[in-house]
Amino acid sequence: MVQFFHPATGDITLTGVMAALGDPVRLAIVRALHEAGEGKSCRMACPTQHIAPSTLSNHFRILREAGLVHTTKRGVENISVLRHDDLDSRFPGLIEQILSHEPA
């Protein structure tokens, strides 16, 4: 079974979060997961269908390693959910503040 790396809540850094959200595709993925309020497959959270699967996988790896999403395997799909509670405990209000701005 695939095991994904997820940092502990205390290991999530502001630098890592901001670096991961610095890419517009990753920001759009986080926005989609935030709006969904529940887990989504990688393809369903993707802002566009024109991203190669390997590139999309890399985006989700970066989001996971930064502590922004938690991914589990459900059948053949990887389901990701925003780690809202963990992020809010580390950096209160940060995600809401970032996502409150309209996408460019």
Image (cartoon, rainbow, N blue to C red):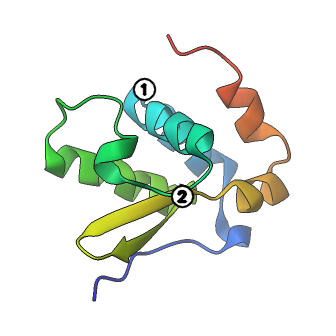
Q: Given this view, does label 2 or label 1 mark the residue nearer the observer? A: 2
Near mark 1 (Cα within 10 A), the count class, few <14, some 14-19 or many ≥20, is: few
For the point 53% across and 45% down, the residue is 33
Q: Answer left or right for 93 relative to 54.
A: right
x then y, percent, for residue 17: 59, 47
Residue reaching furthest to the bottom: 1
Amino acid type of disc 1? Pro
x then y, percent, for residue 102: 61, 14
For the point 34% across and 38% down, the residue is 46
Q: Which residue is mark 1?
A: 24
State whether residue 66 is above or below residue 35: below
Task: For mark 2, give the secondary structure.
Answer: strand
x then y, percent, for residue 77: 28, 66
Residue 82's quadrant in the figure? bottom right
In this rendered view, identify the residue nearer to me: 74 or 82: 74
Q: Answer left or right for 82 relative to 90.
A: left
For the point 53% across and 16% down, the residue is 103
Say the numbered circle drawn on residue 81.
2
Q: Answer left or right for 104 relative to 53.
A: right
Near mark 2 (Cα within 10 A), the count class, few <14, some 14-19 or many ≥20, is: many
